[in-house]
Image (spheres, rainbow, N blue to C red):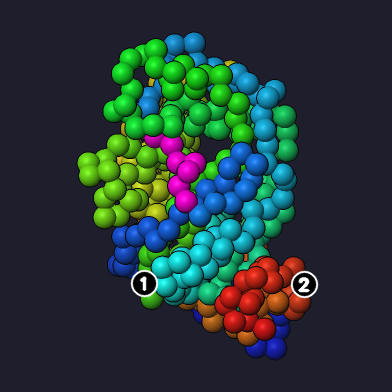
Amino acid sequence: MEQSIHPDSNIYKFPIHPFKRFNKKCVEFKQPVEITCFSYDENRQLHMDDRESRYYYPPNLEDCNLSVGYENLIQKSEGPEPIHSLLDALIHLNETKGDEVKADIVSWRGIFTKLLCTPYNRNESWEFGATLYNVSIHETEQTRLYREGSTPKAKLMGYWGYKFEALCTIGVPATEIQSPDDPELLARKNTIVNTNIQYCSVSKTSLGKNRLIMGAEVDCLIDFNPPYPENPINRYIELKTTKILKNERDNFLFERYKLIKFWAQSFLIGLPKIIVGFRDDDGNLCSLKEIKTLEIPRMVRGKDKMWDAVICLNFLNEFFEWLRRVIDIEDANSSYVISFKEPYQEIEVTFCHNKNPVLADRHLKSFGKK
């Protein structure tokens, strides 16, 4: 089926069906390589370094409730995550090291993840904004609200993920911990969660002929010998929480809906493994499991009503090739809206002229856009 591109129209559509067109030899995906990093401190100030990176150290599962400290949560200001800090990092890389990394599409890892999972998550609406600077894509308010949840229970469960990260990380390498009474370990349980704090890795890769740059918040890293390998991504770990699996239905839902997202998030930036914390309905952390990213597709392969990583990658490749033909207005002040909504049959791209510009003035000046 031909994707519809109408030169005289402001609306373009990329159909999901026929689904079988993506079931073919897998497109090449190159191993991601980190090109720079940056941090946000507790006051949401941006720093072009790794000061907020943390090390993994397993939590104590005794009396470990993820709701502790919820009333003290320091939440970063609401609003969709702009792409500005990611572009600032690329400017800084160019200015300090002379490295001008070229790409076709630039965005956050979370947006790439949602796009990669779209063939199998056709009941989740999303909406992104984009402009022609290397097709820069960012989250809109609608998608942020859906992601964060609006009910008190959804917000509490979101906190459980942050608390799990706090309980699993320390500020020094694990090899420096001398005893269970080390202050670094004792301080974790009472740490006030502050979501302003973030450590982000910026990597480059390619999917088919699409050159990609993505920024990704990194939960923690492991001790490495040597301490800084040729590709730092190899030392990163993703931390996830999910409810304990009590029966076959729970296991099916975990494999069908959770594992695809776990795989996509880590695979896209080359993270080798994920630590999953299993908790009960009251937020009590019960157990931990280590999952290797590259083994996840094999865990679901051949099972009924599951997902296929090859179809996801072929879909994303064809969508990106189409998107690069659609977003062609040479005006960085102009923007497009990329959306996926009911009845979930196609991705729609709408040209918005000079509404909702994606880039800040400093980016327009640096990237030579007028």
Residue sitting nearer the eye, 273 or 213: 213
Give the secondary structure at mark 1.
loop
Q: Tell me which residue sits at (72%, 45%) in the image.
A: 78
Residue ranking furthest to the bottom: 8
Question: What residue did someone put label 2 on?
Answer: 355
Amino acid of disc 2? Lys
Q: Residues within 10 Å of mark 1 (few under 14, many from 20)?
A: some
Residue ranking furthest to the left: 225
Residue 208 bears which disc, if any? 1
Circle 2/circle 1 CB separation < 8 Å: no
Q: Tell me which residue sits at (59%, 51%) in the image.
A: 46
User: Which stretch is magenta?
Assistant: 49-55
- Foreground disc of the pair 2, 1: 2
Q: Tell me which residue sits at (71%, 84%) in the image.
A: 9
Residue 133 bears which disc, if any? none
Q: Residues within 10 Å of mark 2 (few under 14, many from 20)?
A: few
Left or right of residue 65, residue 169 in this image? left
In the depicted structure, whether residue 81 falls above or below residue 1: above
